[in-house]
Amino acid sequence: MIDDDLLTIVREQRSKVRMTTPVEQVIGRGRALRARRRLPGLAAGALAAAGAAALAVTALLPAGHQAGRPLPAQLAAWTVTQRAGGTIYVTVRQLRDAAGLQRRLRADGVPASVTFFGREPRACQPYPADRAVVGKVFGGHGPPLVIHPAALPSGAGVQLNPGHYAPGAPIALAFGLVRASSGCTGP
């Protein structure tokens, strides 16, 4: 039997079938059944989305920590970790939220000015210091950038800007000392 013969037989049979249920009722019942089957999937999907959103918000908010306890605030864009003795480690992965990084450093006791794009604030003036002083404040060759706040000279703060970086690698920060002032490094 070929396909054309089969189609002819089916067409002939169809004309003999009588349907007593209205088409709208059949369509409505099918929609109701499909909706009922989708509800558990939608509820599970909504629960998964809510869980992912909660994790994303948790990952983006800086977590508080105490000196001496190495509890890092793990962020997508950058990480600041304060170690025992007050040493601060800064790793930047994305040039995002410079203001958040600046707030975090200031909360950890580092008078800081952070600019990723644009120029440093006009209120920021260079702090006259030799290489030895700068070397005591900023340790290592990063990333991560290591800051020793206890080594900051009186009246000095830090200025951070993006340095050279390769895609996928942590971003090296250019750093220097500036005169601490409310318009530059905060109160």
Image: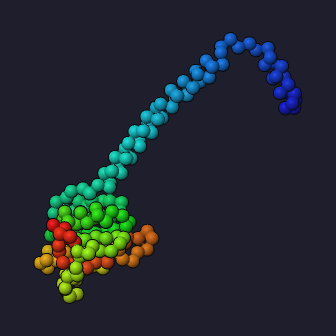
Q: Which of 51 and 185 is in front in this view?
A: 185
Farthest residue toward the front? 122
Q: Is residue 13 visible?
A: yes
Q: Is 115 drawn above or below residue 133 in the view shown?
A: above
The residue lying at 70 percent from left, 14 percent from top is 19
Query: Horizontal and vertical percent for residue 171?
Result: 37, 72
Count the marks: 0
Farthest residue toward the left? 154
Q: Quadrant of the C terminus?
A: bottom left
Q: How is the image coloured?
A: rainbow
Q: Is 117 drawn above or below residue 72 in the view shown?
A: below
The residue lying at 45 percent from left, 39 percent from top is 45
Q: In which quarter of the image is the N terminus?
A: top right
Q: Is residue 142 visible?
A: no
Query: Horizontal and vertical percent for residue 42?
Result: 47, 35
Question: Would residue 135 appear left or right of 55 to someone viewing this image?
Answer: left
Question: Would residue 85 appear left or right of 37 to someone viewing this image?
Answer: left
The residue lying at 22 percent from left, 79 percent from top is 125
Q: Nearer the viewer, residue 8 or 162?
A: 162
Q: Quadrant of residue 24?
A: top right
The residue lying at 29 percent from left, 55 percent from top is 61
Query: Horizontal and vertical percent for residue 168?
Result: 43, 68
Query: Horizontal and vertical percent for residue 113?
Result: 25, 71
